[in-house]
Image (cartoon, rainbow, N blue to C red):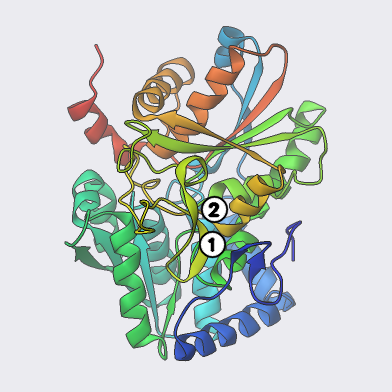
Amino acid sequence: MINNILPDKNGFFGNYGGQFIEEDLKNELNKIEKSFLEIIQDESFLQELDYLMKNFVGRPSPIYFAKNLSEKYGNKIYFKREDLNHTGAHKINHCLGQALLAKKMGKTKVIGETGAGQHGLALATASALLGLECDIYMGEVDIEKAKTNVDKMRLLGANIKPVSFGTKSLKEAVDAALGAYKKEFKNAIYAIGSIVGPHPFPMMVEFFQSRIGIEANSQMKEQYGSLPDYVVACVGGGSNAIGIFNGFLNEQNVQLVGVEPLGKGEKIGQNAASIAFGKDGIIHGFKCKVLQNEKGEIQDAYSVACGLDYPGIGPKHCYLNENKLAKYEIIGDLEAIDAFYELSKTEGIIPALESSHAIAYALKLSKTIKDKKILVNLSGRGDKDINFIMENYPKK
């Protein structure tokens, strides 16, 4: 494996993770784990994956020195340009890996969920490439916010399954997708969108995303002479963050910072900051920090970035937080929107609203330090967000 901290044989990172699911589904996931562990030792699989990453996705994604922002804020600010990947985000990394795994296992369909539409778009793309049927579950609220991505998914041949219950957003999309998978697991694989869900899903997604950090570590040393002082990434479920963190976990002088969405405030239902405000609990078949009330009932999450509005978080992030191997900060809606405009106007790069949370924290951090190197994982581009921003948060 190419990551630094692995789960135990039961899928736990310390106190977090595991499999809290029905026995028949557990048996199927154990088969998936076995196939996954075998296939990542298969040289032909790795060669095919590397070929597609280079020639289909466009990896390695570059690291860009943001000269204008750096001069303005008094630190050296860099971006790992995952927004330049085919489909416009980091999601294609694990979608291609999971779709290849499905193909090797003889599955004919992939089932997935999506919030902002980036995971759904990437999964639809991988499915079209590899000839797999693709069902994407998406909340009706998110369908409206990310209409461009929905149109792209349909163009690629995916079946969009609108979710109309609850908050009609990411949590309910996961609920619906998992429900569908339980009925179809004999011919389908659930291609989960982040490092969440029952084991082995977090481990699998992390494996495919870890190339972000491995690339970034080498690129910083080779292109810019040293490692960054800070590595910053937004965190919903946490796949882009764990991907870049894994390249620096063994570097003692690099501070890892995950940025959660504060949304509109600290009250229940106003945010999606699971590390900051959550308690230990079980959601979607795994244990993590979960937003819940005093009775232990899971609460609705909210963020202006629909890819971050999930009430839980990946188990490895819980482990890193508990063991002080990474720190987790919060950024609100308006701060993220300001950062969206700032990067667009200062560097000519339009970021995703999810990534804008990490950018906002990096700029806030820059006001308290000087002459440091800050590497931000620019996890996605903002095409999907432009209409929503212009309609709801216009600036003269």
Disc 1 and disc 2 in contact, CB within 8 angstroms = yes
Q: Is residue 352 visible?
A: no
Q: Residue 4: x and y, percent?
A: 76, 56
Q: Which of the two residues, 209 or 367, is positioned nearer the viewer here?
A: 367
In the drawing, does residue 6 fall left or right of residue 70? right
In the drawing, does residue 390 fall left or right of residue 330? left
Amino acid, disc 2? Ser
In this rendering, the count of numbered labels is 2
Q: Residue at x 72, y 49 (%)?
A: 214
Mark 2 neighbour density, 10 Å: few (under 14) some (14–19) many (20 or more): many
Q: Which of the two residues, 295 or 26, is positioned nearer the viewer here?
A: 295
In the drawing, does residue 66 fall left or right of residue 89? right
- Splitting the image into 4 quarters, where does residue 35 fall? bottom right
Q: Residue 190: x and y, percent?
A: 43, 74
**Of labels 1 and 2, the one closer to you:** 2
In the drawing, does residue 339 fall left or right of residue 150? right
Q: Which of the two residues, 80 or 274, is positioned nearer the viewer here?
A: 274
Residue furthest to the front in view is 295
Q: Is residue 284 visible?
A: yes
Q: Residue at x 72, y 43 (%)?
A: 325
Mark 1 lies on a secondary structure that is helix
Disc 1 to disc 2, C-alpha distance: 9 Å
Q: Above or below — where is 291 with respect to 335?
A: below
Residue beneath label 2, please? 239
Residue beneath label 1, please? 94
Quarter of the image with the N terminus is bottom right
Amino acid, disc 1? His
Q: Residue 348: x and y, percent?
A: 44, 22
Quarter of the image with the C terminus is top left
